[in-house]
């Protein structure tokens, strides 16, 4: 992505802020096939292993007085369960394992991406688009299978005056098909923008006169990014719940 | 020349993030105004707040995406 626009020669920064997002093969070689093990594969694997470690090892002892790890695992479980139940209702609880998987993967990938020298998998559209398309297909297929043609009531706003309804139907149809686009770009865009800003400030730190300001700015941005990493995972999951609610109860 | 025009376009696309800031500020400000009038109902509406912020913010992220495309893809 950033190889041809490398700012080292003309831009003045020591490194390009987008260099951190380059996907590299781990074990040598230049070509990337679909089976090549890259740094993206590595960090996705670490995220999955970290989730397994947290959830399985954390809750395996089932102590009455929980350890710190057990508290985190139980808090995460309760948090997502309550979110699914509140937004989609009692009959949406059957989607809880799916939503929990999404939330844990995104939040863990975001947090691991904040480690220095690591690779942020969720900053790539290739990752988030697949996640969002899966949500979109689940909602559409489940909605059509459960309600049949009744699912189209989602686009026919029956509470609006009759002459307005065809216009609203077009708007609703467009907004329905833009969902996977905005759903994926929101996550990847936020994470990518935050990491790029940190790297831009890191580039300024090489200039002696403004380096104290830029070090403080990096620290402040890092704190904000920790917050954003969690909020974006939360937003992705709660929007999944909202879309699932549409599949369960179409119509306005 | 064309590359420089793309850079100008990317800078213009950055105006979109300011517009998104207005949107997010509107959502959060109105939530706070409502929450201070009726604090007991505020806790139940935080999910709605985050959904509103996310929708407003997504359009700002679109402008960021346009800027990125102009910088690296054109």
Image: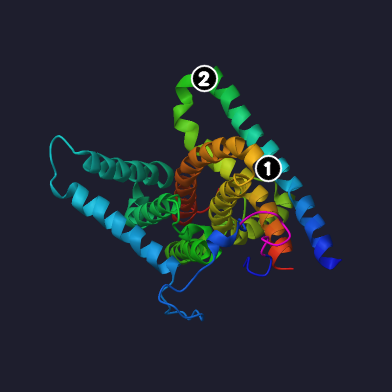
Name the residue nearer the viewer: A97 or A230: A230
Q: Chain of mark 2?
A: B
Q: Position of residue A241 (x, y in %)?
A: 44, 50
Q: Would you say residue A249 sits in the magenta stretch?
A: no
Residue at x 21% of width, y 48% of height: A58
Identify the residue shown where x is 21% and y is 54%.
A56
Is residue A77 found left or right of A37 in the rendered image? left
The residue nearer to you, when weighing A71 against A149, is A71
Residue A41, above or below B24 = below
B64 over B29 or under it: above or below: below
Q: Would you name the residue on which mark 2 appears? A: B38
| Segment tinted magenta in the rendering | A6-14
Percent position (x, y) of residue A12? 70, 54
Distance between mark 1 and mark 2 Cα atoms: 27 Å
Which numbered dot is residue B20?
Answer: 1
Q: Is residue A152 above or below residue A58?
A: below
Of callouts 1 and 2, the N-terminal one = 1
Q: Name the image quarter holding the N terminus of chain A.
A: bottom right
Q: Tell me, yes or no, whether dots 1 and 2 are on the same chain.
A: yes
- Characterize the local packing of mark 1: few (<14), some (14-19) or many (20 or more) Cα atoms within 10 angstroms: many
Provide residue A97's location: percent of width, then percent of height.
Answer: 32, 56
Q: How many marks?
A: 2
């Amino acid at each position: 992505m950033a190889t041809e626009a490398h700012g080292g020669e003309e831009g003045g920064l020591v490194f390009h802020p987008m260099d951190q997002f380059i996907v590299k093969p781990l074990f040598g070689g230049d070509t990337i096939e679909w089976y090549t093990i890259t740094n993206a594969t590595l960090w996705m694997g670490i995220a999955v292993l970290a989730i397994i470690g947290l959830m399985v090892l954390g809750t395996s002892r089932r102590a009455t007085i929980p350890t710190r790890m057990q508290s985190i695992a139980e808090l995460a479980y309760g948090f997502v369960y309550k979110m699914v139940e509140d937004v989609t209702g009692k009959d949406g609880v059957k989607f809880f394992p799916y939503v929990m998987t999404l939330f844990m993967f995104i939040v863990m990938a975001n947090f691991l991406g904040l480690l220095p020298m690591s690779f942020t998998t969720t900053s790539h559209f290739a990752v988030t688009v697949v996640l969002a398309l899966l949500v979109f297909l689940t909602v559409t297929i489940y909605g059509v299978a459960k309600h049949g043609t009744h699912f189209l009531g989602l686009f026919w706003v029956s509470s609006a005056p009759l002459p307005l309804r065809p216009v609203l139907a077009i708007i609703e149809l467009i907004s329905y098909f833009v969902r996977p686009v905005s759903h994926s770009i929101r996550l990847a865009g936020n994470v990518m923008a935050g990491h790029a800003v940190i790297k831009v400030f890191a580039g300024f730190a090489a200039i002696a006169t403004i380096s104290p300001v830029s070090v403080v700015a990096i620290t402040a941005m890092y704190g904000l990014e920790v917050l954003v990493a969690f909020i974006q995972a939360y937003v992705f999951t709660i929007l999944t719940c909202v879309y699932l609610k549409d599949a369960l109860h179409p119509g306005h | 020349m064309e590359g420089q025009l793309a850079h100008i376009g990317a800078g213009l696309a950055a105006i979109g993030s300011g517009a998104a800031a207005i949107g997010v500020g509107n959502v959060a400000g109105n939530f706070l105004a409502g929450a201070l009038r009726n604090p007991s109902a505020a806790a139940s509406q935080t999910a709605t707040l985050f959904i509103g912020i996310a929708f407003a913010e997504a359009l700002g992220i679109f402008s960021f995406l346009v800027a990125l495309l102009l910088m690296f893809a054109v």
